[in-house]
Amino acid sequence: MASTHAISNQFAMDLPEVSAFYTTHDENGRAIFVNPPPDPCTKWHNPIDNEQQFFSLFATSKNPRGPPLVVQNGTCCRMVDFSPGFTSVAHQTVSIDYGVVIQGTIELLLDSGEKRLISPGGMIVQRGTMHTWRNPSATE
């Protein structure tokens, strides 16, 4: 089952091709990777005379109940820097989280045993799944 959604119709530029990773739960409640939902949001848009493009990774009409780190019925945007070799504890967020790798690589491990190595330009939609983050680099 493919779970990377490569988007290749972007402008020719120095940015890496967009790759998106989506998580959900299987019938046993374990976190798994899935193909992106069929949604008109998950594509490149060209709204203004070919002068710009934007990509909407995921959209929702409501927010699930949020953990204390998220304002109730609100959203939060964070930038995270993982130390070389760092591995987080396994945890679950009761929220929809969006991630974009800017520099380096990060490994996302799910409780189902699935894992993905995500490189610069890679995007993640975490939908309330049990997961662990790991920086595989010893120097970055």
Image (cartoon, helix red, strand yellow):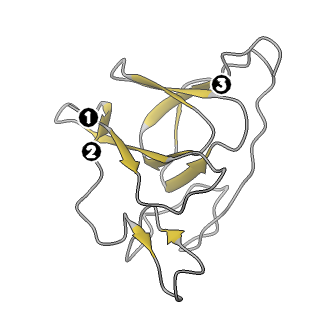
- Which quadrant of the figure has residue 101? top right
Indicate whether 16 appears above or below 85.
below
SS label for mark 2: loop
Indicate whether 85 appears above or below 79.
above
Q: Is residue 62 left or right of residue 51?
A: left
Q: CA distance from mark 2 to mark 1?
A: 6 Å
Q: CA distance from mark 2 to mark 3?
A: 25 Å
Of labels 1 and 3, earlier in sequence is 1
The one of 92 and 115 positioned closer to us in this rendering: 115
Mark 1, residue position: 2
| Amino acid, disc 1 | Ala
Mark 2 touches mark 3? (CB < 8 Å): no
| Amino acid, disc 2 | Asn
| x and y percentages locating residue 56 in the rendered image | 47, 67
Of labels 2 and 1, earlier in sequence is 1
**Quadrant where the C terminus lies?**
top right
Q: Is residue 133 left or right of residue 111?
A: right
The disc label shown at residue 88, or none = 3
| x and y percentages locating residue 74 in the rendered image | 58, 73
Mark 3 Cα-neighbour bin, 10 Å: few <14, some 14–19, many ≥20:
few
Q: Residue at position x 53%, y 71% from top? A: 54
| x and y percentages locating residue 63 in the rendered image | 45, 69
**Quadrant where the N terminus lies?**
top left
Mark 2, residue position: 35
